[in-house]
Image (cartoon, helix red, strand yellow):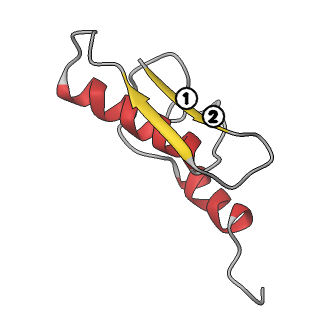
Amino acid sequence: MGLTSWKPGTQGPVTVKLNDHYKLTANQRRTVACHELGHALSLDHATSTSSCMYSGKYISLHPSKHDYGLLPRIYPKPGT
C-alpha cells in the first residue's frame, strides 16, 4: 500500500510513496500514511496493535506511546 525508501547509511533524503491504485477508506489511507511516515522517521514495525507501525492490518490511525518514546532515543536533543 505504501513504500518508504532511503539510501542505507545516510540521513536522507527519504522518499515516501503511497499507492492510490487500491480502493481504501479514508482511515485505511491514513493508517498507511502514518505507517510509512513512521518508517521515514526510522521507526520499525511494531508488535502492538495499538500502533500504526503494526504491519499488515489497518488497526490504528496513530503511533503508539512506545513509538513516540523511541523518537527521543533516535533523535536525542543536543547535549543530552
Could you tell me which secondary element the residue under label 2 belongs to?
A: loop
Residue drawn at (19%, 20%) of the image: 25
Front-most of residues 57 and 37: 37
**Looking at the image, is 77 positioned above or below residue 45?**
below
Q: Residues within 10 Å of mark 1 (few under 14, many from 20)?
A: many
How many labels, in total?
2
Residue drawn at (24%, 29%) of the image: 27
Q: Amino acid at mark 1?
A: Tyr
Front-most of residues 35 and 68: 35
In the picture of the structure, the residue carrying the numbered disc 2 is 46
**Which of the 4 quarters of the picture holds residue 58?**
top left
Q: Amino acid at mark 2?
A: Ala
Looking at marks 1 and 2 on the same chain, the residue that comes earlier in the sequence is marked by 2
Residue drawn at (55%, 22%) of the image: 55
Residue 51 visible from this viewpoint = no
**Looking at the image, is 51 positioned above or below residue 20?**
below
The x, y position of residue 61, in whole percent, is: 35, 38
**Which of the 4 quarters of the picture holds residue 69?**
bottom right
Residue placed farthest to the top in the image?
A: 22
The x, y position of residue 16, in whole percent, is: 46, 36
